[in-house]
Structures are given as structure tokens and as C-alpha cells.
Image: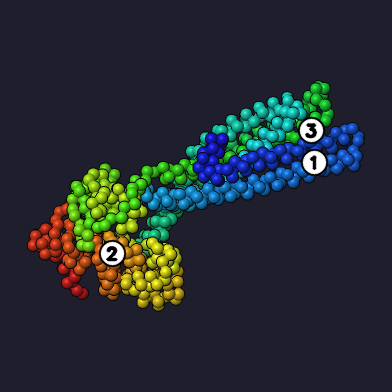
């Protein structure tokens, strides 16, 4: 229990940790004020036994009780406030820390780890810490401190009863320790099922179009329902396994209260305890373990807190790419690779590629699916680090640049565009949040999206759905290009940016790409002949190697992969109903 509390406090930032420590100190004072009820009762009981209940006796007893209630309430309120502030602040800071840490992890991490798991940690896990940890830490600490203070006071009244209470606490913590061990295994399974459920929900929602198109509603629903059922079973199993321990803890504490009563009565009958102390012990027996009983039941949730902290720390301890390079500003934007290789999960994807991409030229990358095209562009822009060889920008290894300094030189337009649930203007100025509206409009006009934006209900202030769900594919692409135009980076990476655009939007999209790529170093993955044939050089990537390299005319004179690629596109383009 104490080890878990320590791990949680270590998880907090220093200022939040101070809040929790201060709240524990205040909880100690609260416990002391709670314990003042015993002297108040003692004053009244002594007066009753002496048949000397006076006005002063009543006032004294009332004052002690009022001080106890007011002091306890005030310290509890302040301690609760500090713990609440500490809990929410810790989780807010950790969410931002996780987001910043994820930003610089290799892209391969997102292949190895499901989106559901990452989202579960940043949402469910952090929410567990926000809602559960604050209450659990508060209740457990308060229960332990209150019990410790009251036990100390009982020791002052009668050491024999005090020793009985201490022995009872030893047995209680033995039971609690066993419950915590059972809870450790169950909490891990519970959070794994939580992650699996989140992953299935995301998969189902993201793939709803395919599910309905291919009439897979039943099978996909069954998979989702299975995840829900397994999550329910994991939560139920955890509760059912812990209930016996909670019952045992509660029974033991109540039994110890009964023992205190019996021993006190026997000691009084034997003449070794006066009547006043006996009555005080009997009354105190109902107060001693009340807070600890509550704390014991909640302590089972400490394992959930522990596992949640570990899951967050697992992400935070995942090694980032080395981003501590220099803030270099290149003068030229030629890119070169020197015998680079890269493997993913022991499977070599890029195998000894060397190439030169002069600045202000266009390099088109084509080849069969799975040949390594996207991986190559990821290495050229340092989404991954190469295993062997090196990639340079202006003659300097990409790893010599700090990540932020490097990314200033790149803009990306992907086949699958992601837009945020925000205004169109804010999506365009995403990389420059303080950019004036005039620049936003200029970028939109250059990207050929100003006209359709102005037809929307609120123009540039129109809030689009998450992922740009309310816009067509071509409209999203053009807004993405406007965003890249705003950044005005010297190196542009286009990953099949026109693959899913309908013919009606293709002309405007090509005009937008022309505006974006003017006087830039262009690296493009493309399947359309129109976007490839005018490139300064064409790379045909197959099996992780450069199978062919040259201009369109040069490669067409060879009876190779590129020639077959072009002929297949021509046949497809000439096909008519």
C-alpha cells in the first residue's frame, strides 16, 4: 500500500507532490481534531459518574466538540481541495507530457502499438487517475492517519487496549496485503480489456463505411460485442475476487471493536480498569476503526492507480528519437542518401539505397505495392532513423539537426488528410496559429479552395467535423495544401496526394499542387502518369532497392518495371463503357 502511494507521488510533478504532502499533513491535523471527540466524551462521562453535571461541564463538552467538528471540517476541506487540485493538475500535466513524448517517438512505435492502447492510456488511464486516484489517496491516507492518532490516544488511556488495537492492525494489514496482491493481477487484466475495448470501438467507427458496404455489420458487431462482454467479465471478476477480502477486512475490524469492549469490561470486573476508562474504551471502540474500514475497502483500487501509473510510465520511458541536435538553418535544400538500410521487425524494407535529390527539382517515386516507397520518404524526412548509412540535407546528417529545426524545412501532403474539429481558418493556419486572416485567405486562394469555403455557411469560421468529415476528399486535400502553402517550407513531400481525387476536382487540385511546389524541392509518391512524367528524375523502388532510375523518356526506352507501369496506366485510361 505504502509503496503504491509512493510510486503515485513520484509520478506527480514536484509542485503537485507538495500539494499531496501538504494535504497529508492537514489530514493529520484533521485526525487530531477527530480524536478530540474522545476527551469531550470523557468529560461528560466523568461528570455523570461523579453525579456532578453542571453548566460548566456542558459548556466545556460542547466547546470541545465544536472545536473538533469545526477543526476537522476545515482541515478536511482544505486537504480535499489540495488533493483534488493535485490530482487534476497531475493528470493534465501528464497528458501534455505524453503528447509531447509521443511527438518524438519513431513512427514504427505506432505500428507496434495499437491506436486503442495509446488512446486508452491518454484517456481512460488518465481519467482513472483523475477520478479514482484523488479519492483513493485521500480516503486511504485519511483513514490511516485517523486510526494512528486515535490508537495513540487509546495507548495514553490504557496501554493494554492500545496493544490489542495494534495487534488488530497487524492482522488487518496482512489481509489487506493479500487483497492487494490479488488486485494487482486483476487490475492489469481490467486495464488490458479496457484498452482492447477502446481499440475495437475505434476500429468499428473508423471502418463503418467498409462494414456497411461489404455487409459485415453482423460479424463486426459480434467482435465489438465480444470486446464489451470481455470487458464486463474482467470488471466483474475483479469485483467478485475482491469482495471476500473486503468482507474479511470489515468483519475483522468490527470483531476487534467487540474484543475491545469485552476486554475492557473484563478488566473492569477484575478491578484493573476504572469505570470511566472502561466506558471511554467501549465508546471509542466504535470510532477507532471506522475510517480504516472505509480506507481498507478503497485500498483495493490502489492497484488500479498503480497499473495506470505504470502504463503511462511505459510510454514515457519508450526511447525517443534523438532530437537534441543543433538549430541548423540550411542554405541549400539538396537531399542525399548514402547506402541507407532500414528494417522493421527484422524484415529489411530499405536495402542499400544511395541517391541524390538536387534542390528545386522534382523526384517521383513509383513501384509495386510494398516495395518501400513510403518508408523511403519517411527516412528522407526522418520519421524514422536509418539503421545503416545516412541521409543528409545540405550536406549535414539529418540527425545533426534538432527535430524542430529539421521539420521547419518540410511540408507534407498525404493521401489521407486529417483535419481537426475546428474552424477552416484554424486548420489552414495550424502551423502558424498567430497568422493574420489575410495570409490564410491568400493561401486558400493559391490552393484553389477559397471559392468553396466562401459558399459554406460561416465561410472561414465554419467548424468542420473531426477528420474533416463534412468535406469531400478533394476539398480536404486542397485545405491540406493550403496549410502546406502557409508553412512555405522548401522541401515538399507528396504521398499519393491525388490518388483518391475525382476527375472533377483533379484540375483544381493540380493547380493547387503547382502553387505549393513552385521553386521547391519535391519528393512525390505517385501512381498517376500525369504527375510523374515531368519529374526531373524517377525512382522505381522494388524490394527495398532502386530497380530503375532516370527521366520518363529514359525509362520508357527500357523494357522494365516503369515501362510496364506506364503501359498499364494507358490501358486503364483508354478503357470505356
User: In front of the other: label 2 or label 3?
Assistant: 2
Residue nearer the viewer, 273 or 429:
429
The residue drawn where x is 67% and y is 28% is 166
Q: CA distance from mark 1 to mark 3?
A: 16 Å
**Pointers 2 and 3 in contact (C-beta within 8 Å):** no
User: Residue 497: which numbered mark, if any?
Assistant: 2
Q: Residue 208: x, y in percent?
A: 39, 62
Q: Which label's residue is closer to the chain start, 1 or 3?
A: 1
x and y percentages locating residue 512 in the rendered image: 29, 70
Quadrant in the picture for residue 518: bottom left
- The image shows residue 313 at horizontal and vertical percentages of 45, 43
**Image quadrant in which the N terminus is located:** top right
Asked which quadrant contains residue 551, the reply is bottom left
Q: Residue 566 location in percent, x, y?
A: 15, 64
Q: Residues within 10 Å of mark 3 (few under 14, many from 20)?
A: many
Residue 66 visible from this viewpoint:
yes
Q: Image check: 135 left or right of 74?
A: left
Residue 280 marker: 3
- Element type at marker 3? helix
For label 1, the residue is 64
Give the answer, above or below, for where 215 lies relative to 319.
Answer: below
Asked if residue 198 is positioned above or below residue 462 in the image, the reply reads: above
Decide which of tag 2 and tag 1 comes sooner along the chain: 1
CA distance separating discs 2 and 3: 81 Å
The quadrant holding residue 370 is bottom left
Distance, label 2 to label 1, CA atoms, is 77 Å
Helix, strand, or loop for circle 1?
helix
Amino acid at each position: 500500500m505504502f509503496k503504491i502511494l509512493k510510486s503515485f507521488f513520484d509520478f506527480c510533478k514536484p509542485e503537485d507532490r507538495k500539494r499531496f504532502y501538504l494535504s497529508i499533513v492537514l489530514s493529520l491535523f484533521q485526525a487530531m481534531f477527530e480524536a478530540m471527540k474522545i476527551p469531550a466524551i470523557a468529560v461528560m462521562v466523568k461528570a455523570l459518574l461523579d453525579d456532578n453535571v453542571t453548566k460548566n461541564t456542558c459548556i466545556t463538552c460542547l466547546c470541545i466538540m465544536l472545536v473538533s467538528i469545526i477543526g476537522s471540517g476545515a482541515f478536511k476541506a482544505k486537504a480535499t481541495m489540495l488533493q483534488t487540485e493535485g490530482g487534476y493538475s497531475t493528470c493534465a500535466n501528464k497528458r501534455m507530457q505524453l503528447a509531447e513524448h509521443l511527438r518524438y517517438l519513431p513512427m514504427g512505435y505506432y505500428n507496434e502499438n495499437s491506436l486503442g492502447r495509446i488512446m486508452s492510456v491518454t484517456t481512460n488511464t488518465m481519467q482513472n487517475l483523475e477520478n479514482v486516484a484523488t479519492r483513493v489517496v485521500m480516503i486511504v491516507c485519511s483513514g490511516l492517519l485517523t486510526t494512528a492518532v486515535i490508537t495513540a490516544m487509546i495507548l495514553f488511556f490504557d496501554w493494554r487496549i492500545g496493544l490489542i488495537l495494534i495487534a488488530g492492525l497487524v492482522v488487518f494489514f496482512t489481509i489487506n496485503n493479500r487483497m492487494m496482491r490479488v488486485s494487482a493481477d486483476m487490475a492489469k487484466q481490467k486495464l488490458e480489456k479496457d484498452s482492447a475495448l477502446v481499440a475495437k470501438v475505434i476500429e468499428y467507427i473508423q471502418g463503418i463505411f467498409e462494414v456497411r458496404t461489404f455487409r459485415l455489420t453482423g460479424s463486426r458487431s459480434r467482435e465489438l460485442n465480444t470486446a464489451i462482454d470481455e470487458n464486463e467479465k474482467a470488471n466483474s471478476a475483479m469485483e467478485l475476487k475482491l469482495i471476500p477480502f473486503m468482507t474479511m477486512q470489515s468483519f475483522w475490524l468490527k470483531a476487534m471493536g467487540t474484543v475491545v469492549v469485552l476486554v475492557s469490561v473484563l478488566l473492569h470486573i477484575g478491578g484493573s480498569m476504572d469505570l470511566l476508562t472502561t466506558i471511554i474504551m467501549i465508546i471509542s471502540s466504535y470510532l477507532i476503526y471506522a475510517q480504516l474500514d472505509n480506507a481498507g475497502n478503497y485500498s483495493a483500487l490502489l492497484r488500479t492507480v498503480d497499473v495506470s501509473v505504470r502504463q503511462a510510465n511505459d510510454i514515457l520511458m519508450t526511447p525517443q528519437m534523438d532530437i537534441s541536435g543543433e538549430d541548423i538553418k540550411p542554405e541549400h535544400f539538396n537531399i542525399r542518401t548514402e547506402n541507407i538500410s532500414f528494417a522493421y521487425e527484422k524484415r529489411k524494407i530499405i536495402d542499400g539505397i544511395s541517391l541524390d535529390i538536387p534542390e528545386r527539382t522534382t523526384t517521383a517515386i513509383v513501384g509495386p505495392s510494398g516495395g518501400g516507397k513510403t518508408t523511403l520518404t519517411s527516412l528522407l524526412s526522418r520519421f524514422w532513423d536509418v539503421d545503416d548509412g545516412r541521409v543528409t540535407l545540405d550536406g549535414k546528417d539529418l540527425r545533426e539537426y534538432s527535430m524542430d529545426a529539421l521539420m521547419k524545412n518540410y511540408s507534407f501532403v498525404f493521401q489521407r488528410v486529417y483535419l481537426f474539429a475546428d474552424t477552416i481558418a484554424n486548420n489552414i493556419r495550424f502551423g502558424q496559429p498567430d497568422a493574420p486572416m489575410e495570409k490564410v485567405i491568400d493561401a486558400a486562394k493559391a490552393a484553389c479552395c477559397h471559392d468553396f469555403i466562401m459558399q459554406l455557411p460561416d465561410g472561414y469560421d465554419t467548424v468542420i467535423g473531426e477528420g474533416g468529415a463534412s468535406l469531400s476528399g478533394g476539398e480536404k486535400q486542397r485545405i491540406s495544401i493550403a496549410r502546406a502553402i502557409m508553412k512555405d517550407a522548401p522541401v515538399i513531400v507528396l504521398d499519393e496526394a491525388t490518388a483518391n481525387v475525382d476527375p472533377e476536382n483533379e484540375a483544381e487540385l493540380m493547380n493547387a499542387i503547382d502553387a505549393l511546389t513552385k521553386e521547391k524541392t519535391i519528393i512525390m509518391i505517385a501512381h498517376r502518369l500525369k504527375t510523374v512524367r515531368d519529374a526531373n528524375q524517377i525512382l522505381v523502388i522494388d524490394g527495398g532497392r532502386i530497380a530503375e532510375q532516370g527521366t520518363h523518356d529514359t525509362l520508357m526506352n527500357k523494357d522494365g518495371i516503369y515501362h510496364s507501369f506506364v503501359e498499364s496506366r494507358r490501358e486503364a485510361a483508354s478503357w470505356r463503357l
